[in-house]
Amino acid sequence: MEPRLDYHKANPEAYKAMLNFEIAVNKLGLEESLLELIRLRASQINGCAYCVDLHAADARKAGETERRLYSLSVWREAPFYTPRERAALAWTEALTDLSHTHAPDADYKTLLAEFSPAESVAVTMAINAINSWNRIGVGYRKVPAAD
């Protein structure tokens, strides 16, 4: 796959706005490991190779195990995730595939059972941020660096 353009250089102000959104999300009080699970799962669904590569590495740095990372795409069947993580992952999938899921009430209720209202907004903002980054990455064909 060939990159389309360098969006950093093409519109630095737009890129800066996304970075500021990401910085704000990182300050909302969610655990780093949970944020990385959210980012990685959304990136898998959206098919953003760059973001999958980046967030798998960041998740490892945040203490994630290989076993949990390898199982993330089948988290519903794997016993390795906490109820809090499961609620965030279900909400991630619901909002990432919004045209098919329409954010089901069951997923929302599960989210609120594990997160305070403020935390639920933080989870939603994290999902929004990574979905935006995925659309930039996929749209402009950003690829991971080859080793």
Image: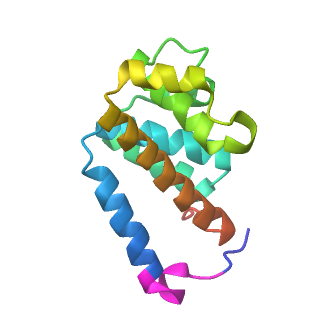
Hey, which quadrant is residue 85 in on the image? Answer: top left
Does 134 sit left or right of 11 as displayed?
right
Residue 80: give x, y in percent of width and height: 46, 16
Q: Residue furthest bottom?
A: 10
Residue at 61% in and 14% down: 77
Q: Quadrant of the N terminus?
A: bottom right
Front one among 102 and 72: 102
**What segment is highlighted magenta in the picture?**
5-13
Front one among 112 and 39: 112
Residue 115: give x, y in percent of width and height: 35, 26
Does 4 sit left or right of 6 as displayed?
right
Q: How is the image coloured?
A: rainbow
Residue 104 seen by the camera: yes
Q: Magenta includes 112?
A: no
Does 89 sit left or right of 65 as displayed?
right
Residue 126: give x, y in percent of width and height: 42, 47
Hey, which quadrant is residue 71 in on the image? Answer: top right
Count of labels shown? 0
- Up the image or down, 145 lies above or below 93; here it is below
Residue at 53% in and 32% down: 91
Hey, which quadrant is residue 105 in on the image? Answer: top right
Q: Magenta includes 10?
A: yes
